[in-house]
Image (cartoon, grey):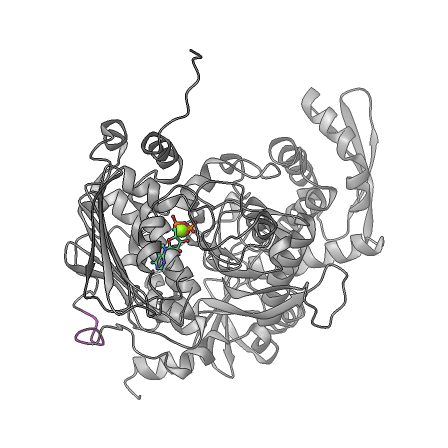
Amino acid sequence: MGRIRVLSDVVANKIAAGEVVERPASVVKELLENSLDARARRVRLEIEAGGRRLIRIADDGHGMLRDDALLAFERHATSKLADVKELFSIATLGFRGEALPSIASVSRLTLETRSDDEPTGTVVEFAGGKLLRCDETALATGTTITVRDLFYNVPARRKFLRSEQTELAHIASLVTHYSLAYPEKSFELRHNGNELLAVTPVAKIGERVFQVFGSQTISDLVEIPERIHSIGGTPEERADAFRLRGFVSRPQVQKFNRNSIYLFVNGRLIRDRVLLHALSAAYRNLIPPDAYPFALLFLDCPAEEVDVNVHPSKIEVRFQHSSFVHDFVRDAVREMLVEARPVSTLPLAAPGPQGAAQLPYSEFSQRMMAAPFPNEAPAESAKPPVPEGNLPQFTLRGTTVFTPPKLDFSGGSIPVDAPATPPASPRRGAVPDTHGALPPELYAEAGASLDALRDLRPLGQLHASFILAAGPDGLWIIDQHVAHERVLFEKVLRQMAAGEVEKQQLLMPIVLELTAGQVIEFERLEADLRAIGFEIEPFGPRAIAISATPSDLSAAEVERVLFEILEIADKELRQTSVEEIRANMAASIACRAAIKINMPLDLTKMQWLLAELAATEFPMSCPHGRPIALRYGTREILKGFHRI
Ligand code: ADP
Ligand code: MG
């Protein structure tokens, strides 16, 4: 007899479960996607012990017919694909027909379901993949699936589960993600009886963001209204168009990891390096290279443009035209930031995020963290150069008053079982939808723009470092050094792009000795250095003579800037594009040439600087990502004086 045998279904399902069901959150993902595919309007999730003891999901979707209820547990049984052609144009979240049999093979599972087309419902029970019963019963339309004792028959898997807290955090993050993608549906998540998330249907994603994260977050975001673009480049609406919409944070919001980046392609939560890279590219020179924005992006495209059948749990995708997608997303986000020119304002006293949004982990982002995009510099070498010598010598008392709003929904460490609603918040309580409707004035606040810079009247300086200015809507504080840095940075880039850099000839050439490594870097960067305004000749084997420099740079700074450029190039930019190398050089020059802090300025000079800043493309942050201007809004001032 031959040695090869066909595996029994029970064994095959358990093997598939190894891929599909990695942890409790993967069960939740599959079941949640099934409910959404069944067009549920309301999804309720109950979790116990981080999902190990119990995962129950109840939906009001279209339910299953009696015959289908059993068939659904056959391997590769699906109602969503009829033939192989459809595999390339998948419109549902599920399609592999693997989830239910896999989950049933590693747990004790009960399915209760009733279709609208039948008068009664069906209960089906499995344990370790074996059918225990299948009965007719009275039920409302919809489906409830209860998964108990996950991995009870797979001790090896159970051993690898993380703490209850970690597993719950993954689940909470997942449900939060999906609640953001489907604002027209209601979602509820409870853990050991405590409510972690409860959102009722709303018309706009903005309102859902508000429900989930609270008003502080929404006022930190810039909305991207739908942008449409086709590969052919034709602007009019076409069936094959790509559409992007969502929210991204102002540059002042800087996260230490990617946990606050939520990406959806055709309604499916995914992780994708192309999109992540496009997002970092949009924020280049607006936030530090090792920081991440908050982003909630929805990309919709024809199903044939994206292959979702890349990974068993369907969280990776492959775009057919990935560089088109990359540039479309990068440009849409960047253009929106240019247009909005969002200002940092003071935080309003407002409700914070819901419990689920404060849990610290996200399965997807954590996995993404593990693998940087090939072009990305490793995070530890990407510290922005800070002009240490120029740091203020004073301490600011009361700085907290002017601190821009901080978001803490991803890094928060509330105990997982704490009630979702902090008792301090007055608007929480009996109403399940904890934040109510979005107050319209918040949208107005979020729209505050740095265009107001044009109309500012400087009043004086604080500590000879910060310009205080009166504006049409409040008091402004502008960091003079970074403001000038932004002005010079854009000027140098503009001149370079036009091939018309302003140079100054030095009376005496400056001679610098280089190390062997610097000699190599110098040779590599010679053309770029010339493009930015340096005239440099080799001066013997290990030295260079500089005879002209970019016009804004004083002779005293030349040596530092040049070594800085050679060093940055060495550390971070080996694999990056010419554009990025030049932007980094421009940033170095701008930083060294800019007005320092601790430098008294007269009013005319302040006026000049504000006007120059107003004329820049990105007045929000300096090229290293630090904020430039803060606004203390009239509303907050009036509130502070109890006048409203
Ligand atoms: P897939 O989602 O890939 O089709 P699953 O194993 O997840 O495979 O589900 C198998 C089938 O069971 C689905 O195709 C669907 O017809 C049915 N089903 C699963 N969950 C639900 C639900 N909540 N409501 C209605 N039908 C469901
Ligand atoms: Mg499914």
Residue in the image at 62% along x and 73% along y: 607
Q: Is residue 230 left or right of residue 629?
A: right
Whether residue 211 appears in magenta in the rendering, the answer is no
Residue placed farthest to the front in the image? Answer: 1
Question: What residue sits 46% from the left and 80% below the top?
Answer: 444
Report x, y in % for residue 148. Answer: 19, 45
Q: From the viewer's perspective, tell me whether residue 296 is left or right of residue 400.
A: right
Q: Is residue 148 above or below residue 613?
A: above
Height in image: 396 above or below 424?
above
Q: Nearer the viewer, residue 178 or 425?
A: 178
- Residue at the far top: name it: 1
Q: Is residue 513 visible?
A: no
Residue nearest the viewer, comparing 499 with 609: 499
* Quadrant in which the C terminus is drawn: bottom left
The answer to whether residue 74 of the structure is visible from this angle is yes
Image quadrant assignment for residue 353? bottom left
Please report the bounds of the magenta region as a residue range.
424-430
Q: What's the magenta bit mostly, secondary-structure-wise? A: loop
For the N terminus, the quadrant is: top left
Q: Position of residue 224 (x, y in %)?
A: 55, 68
Percent coordinates x, y for residue 76 in the rendering: 43, 43
Query: In the rendering, at what x and y percent does residue 641 appear?
Result: 30, 83
Res 3 → quadrant: top left
Task: Tally the marks.
Answer: 0
The residue sitting at the bottom extreme is 643
Say whether residue 564 is left or right of residue 205. right
